Amino acid sequence: MLQELKRRDLPPVVTPGTTADNWQQRRREMIEILAREEYGFSPEPPDHVSAETTFLEERAWAGKAEHREIALKFPTPKGEFSFPVDLVIPYSDEKLPLFIYISFTKYPIGKYGPIEEIVDSGYALATFCYKDVTDDKDDDFSSGLAAMYPRENTGSAWGKISMWAWAASRVMDYVQTLDAIDKNRIFVVGHSRLGKTALWCGAQDPRFSAAVSNDSGCSGAAVSRGKEGERIRDIVTRFPHWFCENYRKYQDREEELPFDQHFLIASMAPRPVYVASAVEDLWADPKSEFLSCAAASSAYKLLGGRGLVSENHFPKPGDVFQEGEIGYHLRTGTHFLSRYDWQQFIKYMDRHFK
Ligand code: GTR
């Protein structure tokens, strides 16, 4: 494994002169590079967000939780913007940890969301459908949130991954106001393109105590240098709107990137981060996702942690590594967000945050 890491020749996250004391400066620098070259810069947060309840079910999920749908609203340069968010909060005398799940579909979030199990595990859930923020289309940034901010004519204007991530931070603004939620245990989760989004959201917004990426692959958890399956050329051709324009210059020139995806993971440090892969998800490339975790570990070690704690070889199907601040598992099967994946995320959070 070490040899393979060497072969990939990744730029270091811990540069000469970086110490535990000036780590936040290095972290900001990495985020700046990722924004400028890959995802685009996001606007400042709005002064305030507000919420209007649009639906309330007091005894949801067999009476175990309250389900509330809100319209989350905030001012933008072009007037008020609003998108629906669903909250499921178990009845409890104690403050609860919360997953903010960026979803492909509206509540009750379909095949990827075992909501009752999440509730039964003592976790609250806040979720929104990413398309309610802005369409997942190359639409010249004309839909939803994209149209609410003036678009600068630079190569680093925000792409849609940045927009979805920024929206999750607006949900964070709102849940900060809820008494039922433990502010030190709020985690962001996403699958695939929304796993890329969850990592980018957690990297930028330190109010998230942890971020979880499921099968996020290319331009998510997986390092691009030496990556198999999907490459930058594939992704910027099929989904140019996910990124800023500058990212296109790296197609077939991965070795010229002034960063690699392990910067994204390391930008979480010292906070926990979890990366899940699936054996048959070769388009995402589990090996490159795992190597990224290994390469990001130096940041955690610098800060007195351990990073990824695993065996010193590539994981076998079914391996779960949850000891370190970087958690990882390799599930059997295909590209999917399964119950098994959620169970591992919950186990990991229970372990690191109780
Ligand atoms: C694929 C894309 C991947 C992944 C996936 C998804 O087509 O190439 O990067 O994000 O979509 O989001 O389901």
Image: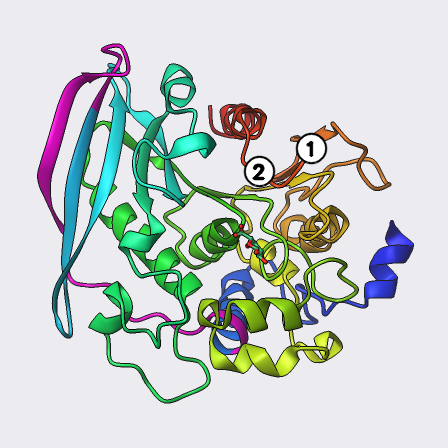
Is residue 285 shown to the viewer in this render?
A: yes
* Magenta stretch bounds: 37-66
Residue 183 or residue 106, whichever sits in front: 106
In terms of image quadrants, where is residue 266? bottom right
On screen, residue 60 above or below 302: above
Question: Of the numbered discs in the image, which one, if any, rests on residue 104?
Answer: none
| Three-letter amino acid code of the residue under disc 2 | Phe
**Ligand 1 contact, mark 1 (Cβ < 8 Å):** no
In terms of image quadrants, where is residue 153? bottom left
- Rounded to the nearest angstrom, the CA distance separating label 2 from label 1 is 8 Å
Residue sitting at x 65%, y 36%: 324
Q: Is 166 included in the stretch rendered in magenta? A: no
Q: Which residue is mark 2?
A: 336
Percent x, y of residue 30: 55, 68
Q: Residues within 10 Å of mark 2 (few under 14, many from 20)?
A: some
Percent x, y of residue 52: 8, 43
Percent x, y of residue 14: 67, 64
| Three-letter amino acid code of the residue under disc 1 | Gly
Residue at the bottom extreme of this rendering: 153
Is residue 44 shown to the viewer in this render?
A: no
Residue at disc 1, secondary structure? loop
Residue at disc 2, secondary structure? loop
Q: Residues within 10 Å of mark 1 (few under 14, many from 20)?
A: few
Q: Which residue is mark 1?
A: 333
- Is 191 positioned to the left or the right of 231 in the image? left
Residue 332 or residue 207, whichever sits in front: 332
**Ligand 1 contact, mark 2 (Cβ < 8 Å):** no
Q: Is 65 included in the stretch rendered in magenta? A: yes
